[in-house]
Image (cartoon, rainbow, N blue to C red):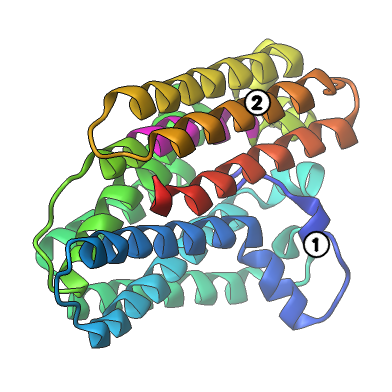
Amino acid sequence: GGVGGIVPADEGKKGGMLNALYKFSRPHTIRGTILASCACVTRVLLDCIEKADFVEWRLLRIAAVGLVALLCGNAYIVGINQIYDVDIDKVNKPFLPVAAGEISKPMAWTLVLGTAFAGLALVASTFSSVITALYCLGMGFGTVYTVPPFRWKNNAFLAAFSIAMVRGLLLNIGLHQAASNALGLPCTWPPQVLFIASFMTVFAVVIAIAKDLPDVDGDRQFKVKTLASTWGVANAAKLVERILLGNYAMGIAVGFLAPGVNTLLLVSSHLGLAGFLRFFSSKLDPDSVPSIKLFYKNIWKLFYAEYLLFPFF
């Protein structure tokens, strides 16, 4: 499995080149990136409005440039994974455009290198050297995850670490600092921001494990050692559930203990999301591919929900 995992309900449709490009971008990861960006900017704006600070709204254009750069980085990471994993994807994800022959390898390389260059150029020309360094570090993690001789994806710990860094810590810390800079505000670290960075770093570990649940057959065939292929789907899914329940317990604790947070929302929302997690986990049939895919799709719904709630914590 790649950094993005598998959500075939969106991506398995037949179509022309536009649909192939859509599938190549792994739209469920694009949604996550857009939600994270919008949530972090909204959080900074709400803090600013609450403190009655002056906001230079024209600087929102800079935030929009940052979003485009993040989408370019996202496309680079999921694209390079499809290039190097084409043989595995023919077994695990035959609907992906490179594996299906809808996009040739030369075209895929053009898209990957083009988005990498565009993203780096946008960040370097718009943001500080710190943000540029964080962006490059994220691209580096995405590269060593997939590209030989590193292939961190073949080691369950290194795969989880790289995804946690990219989609967890670096993304959320970088977004908050970039949003603060773009709006001309001093960069402070309120408990809500520290919470979402911690929460999503752990959640990214969950995604790193869960994305491989539908891919056991291909991963075993190509000797990719994931937790799912080593422990079995049932045990890996149970670990996913336990880690996420611990994450929600942390959210509830932050609601009660952290100063200046929305206690009612933090506690009630995480109780509700934990309940939804328990419900769909209990319905998982580890021997049914459709059931496994639904389980993974629901994990992403929980991911999206956290970012939708975050600005109001």
Q: Which mark is residue 200?
A: none
Q: Tell me the residue at 13%/51% (across/down).
A: 188
The answer to which of 91 and 308 lies nearer the viewer is 308
**Whole-percent x, y for residue 179 in the image:** 25, 66
Secondary structure at badge 2 equals loop
Say if residue 103 shows up in the picture: no
Above or below residue 299? Residue 221 is above
Closer to the chain start, of discs 2 and 1, is 1
Instruction: Find the residue positioned furthest to the bottom.
Output: 58
Viewed as shown, does residue 84 lie left or right of 73?
right
Residue appearing at x 70%, y 66% in the figure? 23
x, y percentage for residue 115? 44, 74
Q: Main secondary structure of the magenta part?
A: helix
**Residue 223 bears which disc, if any?**
2
Q: Residue at x 82, y 23 (%)?
A: 284
* Magenta-highlighted residues: 198-210
Residue bearing the label numbered 1? 100
